Image (spheres, rainbow, N blue to C red):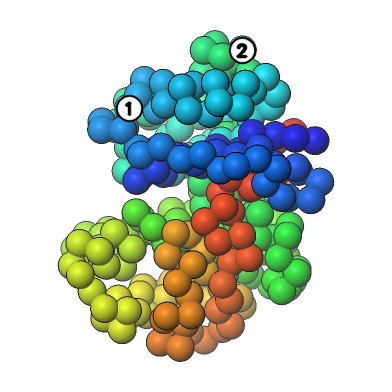
Amino acid sequence: MDVLGIDIGGSGVKAAIVDTKSGRLISEKIRFKTPEPPSPKNIFTGIEENFLSEFKWKGKVGCGFPGVIIKNKVYSAANMTKKWVGINIKKKFYQKFNLKCDALNDADAAGISEIFLNKNIPNKGTVMVITVGTGLGTSIFVDGRLVPNIEFGHLKMYGDCAEKYASNLARKKLNLSWDEWAARFNEYLAYIELLVSPNFIVFGGGISKYFDEYKSNLKSNCKIIQAKNKNDAGIIGAALSVN
């Protein structure tokens, strides 16, 4: 089945058509900068103008969103506007575009793509997928089963959200070297391991394409590997989640 996977993020919104049997992108990936303000109206307008029109799409849609999603409804939207809270993304897609859509947390989507497609990940034990970009996204799988909406990027560190301390956006804003940023991220990893004790960590998100630059500086009690699908993971996982 071919599904349009959409990954809504704090800095960009990306989409491509995905072959859900293989998990491969079968179209070019299109991206537009997250509008300011990142309201439902502005995001949906961008989706229509950049994705639905460009792909002439009439099929099913999978949508990852940076917040808690329960039965397609938004319950939190940390890097978006509060107008998202209460929006049912599935209903919105049907009302606006007459398209069938399933929505889920963006980090959960990225995790699903890795669990299903990355053969280096064990199917037993606790696996954590961490996506590092504008924020810190986390998903947890226990014996291959998703525990949804784990927002560990919002854990408190030094009086504020962890993602404001250890995300890729924080690295860019403070002009941190890879060594300096890795030291911060290691503090975050130690915090996570204290709470969850994962057996395996998959490192994804936009910064994962530079994994070789800092992997030797990452410290953990478990094995850390680079995400197979890198920054496409959210698109692919959103498509794979569609019923």
The three-letter amino acid code for the residue at tag 1 is: Ser
The residue beneath circle 2 is 98
Residue 129 picture location, percent across and down: 55, 64
Q: Nearer the viewer, residue 120 or 13?
A: 13
Image side of residue 221 versus residue 111, left or right: left
Q: Look at the picture and state if 199 lies above or below 219.
A: above
Q: Quadrant of residue 95?
A: top right
Label whose residue precedes the other's in the sequence (2 or 1): 1
What distance separates the C-alpha of mark 2 from that of mark 1? 20 Å
The three-letter amino acid code for the residue at tag 2 is: Asn
Q: Residues within 10 Å of mark 2 (few under 14, many from 20)?
A: few
Q: Quadrant of residue 166?
A: bottom left
Q: Quadrant of residue 78?
A: top left
Residue 105 picture location, percent across and down: 52, 44
Q: Answer yes or no: is residue 108 visible.
A: no
| Residue sitting at x 46%, y 22% | 49
Q: Nearer the viewer, residue 147 or 227?
A: 227
Residue 170 picture location, percent across and down: 25, 63
Q: Look at the picture and state if 35 lies above or below 200.
A: above
Residue 158 picture location, percent across and down: 20, 68
Task: Report the number of discs.
Answer: 2
The residue beneath circle 1 is 39
Location of the C terminus (image quadrant): top right
User: Does the CB distance between marks 2 and 1 fall below 8 Å?
Assistant: no
Image side of residue 148 versus residue 169, left or right: right
Q: Residues within 10 Å of mark 1 (few under 14, many from 20)?
A: some
